[in-house]
Image (tube, rainbow, N blue to C red):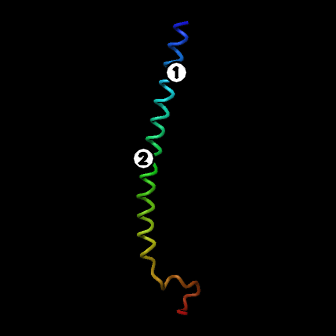
């Protein structure tokens, strides 16, 4: 019985360690995506108004 309890405790510890690792990876990914979003926003702010007309005519 003690062996079974030990295995359950070990599996639970591994499970929570994995969950913690995944949470850390998700936070890192979110931070990286925030950087990318900021860069893309900065780039789109540079979009010249003259290119916004589909037919090339100025109003």
Q: Secondary structure at mark 2?
A: helix
Q: Nearer the viewer, residue 52 or 38?
A: 38
Question: Considering depth in this image, is 13 or 48 the residue closer to the camera?
Answer: 13
Task: Report x, y in % for residue 19.
Answer: 49, 34
Q: Which residue is mark 2?
A: 28
Q: Give how far across and how far down residue 21 sits, in percent.
A: 45, 36
Whichever of callouts 1 and 2 sits on the residue coming sooner in the sequence is 1
Image position of 40 with respect to 4: above or below:
below
Separation of marks 1 and 2 at Cα, in angstroms:
26 Å
Residue found 45% across the figure and 48% down from its top: 29
> Which part of the image, by quadrant, shows the N terminus?
top right
Q: Which image quadrant is residue 8 in?
A: top right
Mark number, residue 44: none
Q: Residue at x 45, y 77 (%)?
A: 47
| 10 Å crowding of disc 2: few (<14), some (14-19), many (20+) | few
Mark 1 lies on residue:
11
| Number of callouts | 2
- Residue lying at 50% horizontally and 13% vertically, measured from the top left: 6
Q: Give me the residue at 48% from left, 86% from top.
A: 50
Q: Residues within 10 Å of mark 1 (few under 14, many from 20)?
A: few
Between 48 and 12, which is closer to the camera in this rendering?
12
In what element is the residue under mark 1? helix
């Amino acid at each position: 019985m003690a062996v079974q309890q030990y295995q359950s405790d070990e599996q639970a510890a591994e499970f929570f360690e994995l969950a913690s690792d995944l949470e850390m990876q998700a936070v890192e990914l979110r931070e990286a995506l925030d950087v990318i979003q900021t860069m893309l926003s900065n780039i789109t702010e540079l979009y010249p108004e003259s290119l916004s007309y589909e037919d090339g005519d100025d109003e």
